[in-house]
Amino acid sequence: METIVDFTKPRNVIDRYQWMRTEDILLDLADKRHNFSILLCNLKNDVNIGSAIRSHAGFLGQEIILYGHKTFNRVPSIGTYAYSIIKHLKFVEEIGPMLGEYDEVIGCDFIEGKSVSVWDSSFDYEKKTLLCFGHENDGLPPALIERCDRLIHIPMFGVTRSFNVAVSAAIVMNEYVRGIYSGQTTAANSVEKASSGR
């Protein structure tokens, strides 16, 4: 396996990937990714998109699907977009067929009487799962909510109305992988095992 030529520019990756080519890192990650993807819908703040991409890379999901806003600030993603599978939906007509590719579509939005706390939720890791997030002010579009198999929300305390979408996505992705690795003795051990695929 070849290594990158420029050894003067270390990247924000775990040690085993530090000097590997991007193509080889993607190839190595292919069979280690967890069985979920995220949909970021109608986000207006490209900083949030970059931050969500960074979190997605940390939790090692499958795909990041952007609907609406395509561009994003690459600075908060600290280069992790290079190791991510990012798709963009240009037209609303593309959403239906895309949702059909998943076994379960879960929307993250607080709707009283309809959404369940993520703390009281569980995930079927055998199912190809799509986690959907909308803009923090507008939430998910009604048409997308109707297509979700279920809705979850994140309990909040204090005065703020909502978390920004990057934080929400990170919390839900953490809950997803926590169910896989909750039997591990330390968080560091879990992260290393997740990264190495053991």
Image (cartoon, helix red, strand yellow):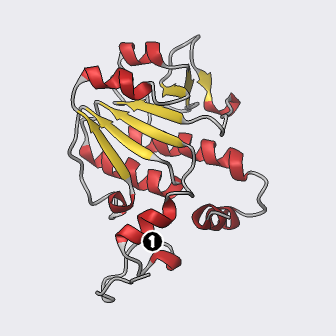
| Residue 73 percent across, percent down from the top left | 24, 53
- Badge 1 marks a residue whose secondary structure is loop
Question: Dividing the picture into quarters, in which one does residue 187 lie?
Answer: bottom right
Residue at the (41%, 82%) spot, across then down = 19
What residue do we see at 44% from left, 39% from top? 38
Residue 136 x/y as whole percent? 37, 30
Looking at the image, residue 142 lies above or below residue 108: above
**Residue 1 appears anywhere in the view:** yes
Picture quarter with the N terminus: bottom left
50 to 13, vertically: above or below: above
Query: Residue 78 sits in which quadrant?
Result: bottom left
- Is 175 on the left or on the right of 55, as rendered? right
Residue wearing tag 1: 13
Q: Which amino acid does label 1 sit on?
A: Val
Q: In this picture, is 113 found above or below 77?
A: above
Q: Quadrant of the C terminus?
A: bottom right
